[in-house]
Amino acid sequence: MEGALLMKLIFEKSIEGREGTQVPSLDVPEQKNLIPKELLRQSNNLPEVGEVDIVRHYIGLSRINYGVDNGFYPLGSCTMKYNPKINEITAGMPGFAYCHPLQPQELSQGALKLMHELEKDLCEITGFKRFTLQPAAGAQGELTGIMIIQAYFRKKGGQRTKILVTDSSHGTNPASAAVCGFQAIEVKSDPKGNVDLRDLGGKMTAEVAGLMLTNPNTLGLFDPNIIEICKIVHEKGGLVYCDGANMNAILGITRPAEAGFDVMHLNLHKTFSTPHGGGGPGSGPVGVVEKLIPFLPSPLVEKKGEKYCLDFGSKDSIGKVKGFYGNFGVLVRAYTYIKSIGAEGLKNVSENAVLNANYVMARLKKHYKAAYGRTCMHECVLSDEGLPNEITTIDVAKRLLDYGFHAPTIYFPLIVHGAIMIEPTETESKETLDEFVEVMIKIAEEAKSNPEIVKKAPHNTYVRRLDAVKAAREPVLRWKP
């Protein structure tokens, strides 16, 4: 790490007149004053370095970067579930990598077949009747789902103006409802971390189009009242939307449609193993029950005889939500993942994810307060309550960096004060989990014996602790000479 701390900016390595490229001689007659002077830069402010300097600079940067291929991400499938390399090999096959979305359908049969089969697999996994593969990520999947609900009630001639959202939901849930013009109404959780049935029943009126719910929820808990929850909403004519961000916990174990959900988005870049670090790319397919199929975005992929085609036929469709047919490269990776491990493999994914999360919680709950004293699903939520010497969650997260671990998700869900959400995923070994747990225990001990070393962490990283407020309000996004 010492070498990384001494790294210079590429601009600081610049030597006037030094070049890293050789440009071929101009082979057409030069035309002077072709571009007006006022449109030409007088200086491009680019560093002048040799090729070897460039290579060493970026290799040096890569060594101080943190990725799922060189370390454990306890924040889990949300962005950094391990991605088998076979997914990349398949997505890079020329027939997939070089196909163009404007190719005629007769020249796109392989791509259309893959999307058709992927949709059928997602239907089998979730219990829904049809899926659209268009949405680009979870948030757009949510928006698509709420637009479908809106179109459904518009077709029925009803005017519903509210969407219920649980207090433990992802922040995109109320945002998606608001973007569609609905008023988001919060439903409380009970002391066990489940939906408060009394609060839900009181707020579920004829003005409510539906409930947005994550199950397992963001507390890492499966709501045992899910059938009753759906019944309360359905009795008042509403629909139930499932935020599928936590599907990693229930693959092959339970199907959301059979619990009573009407609409659901899946995050292929989470549950079905596609790289998503840094914000993209993503894919958020949306599945629906039979009565909502006409409202799905168009086109849908259909099989007619032995040929595959795009069907733009539904007059009630909400229209396109993404250019062309979605993020096709992500679809290829998810298809590869599902086909390579099969039905039994998918069930093992969830069983191991749940086992890993409960193992971590069992070892750490003696040192950190567990938010809820019950078996969790694929993620466990601890808190900083009870840590001595005013040590907080952010201090623990920063100190983890000194020991070579990426921090878990912190301060979410919002209903747990000082939340530390740990999602180990199914691919991490017991040895890796033990290393992480031992470091967490050591930090808890440091909080007692040497609190200053925790409060001032990190000490060994390229960038020390930032002023979080200043970084958010006055970010410096580029180097200036």
Image (cartoon, helix red, strand yellow):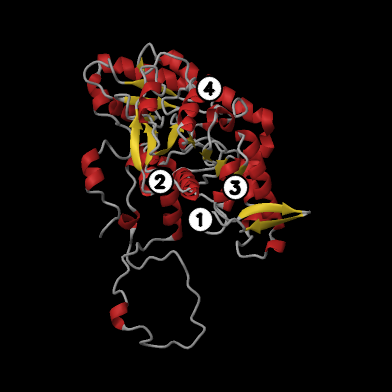
Residue mark closest to the camera, 2 vs 4: 2
Is tag 3's residue or tag 4's residue first in the polypeptide sequence? Answer: 3
Is tag 3's residue or tag 1's residue first in the polypeptide sequence? Answer: 1
**How far apart in space, not on screen, are marks 1 and 2 (Cα)?**
27 Å
Disc 3 marks which residue? 331
Amino acid at dot 2: Gln
Disc 2 marks which residue? 159
In the image, taking residue 165 as reference, residue 464 lies left or right, namely left
**How far apart in space, not on screen, are marks 1 and 4 (Cα)?**
34 Å
Instruction: Tally the numbered discs.
Output: 4
Amino acid at dot 1: Lys
Q: Which mark is residue 322?
A: 1
**Which residue does the image show at 32% across and 77% down from the upper left?**
40
Q: Residues within 10 Å of mark 2 (few under 14, many from 20)?
A: few
Disc 4 marks which residue? 354
**How far apart in space, not on screen, are marks 3 and 1 (Cα)?**
14 Å
Q: Residues within 10 Å of mark 3 (few under 14, many from 20)?
A: many
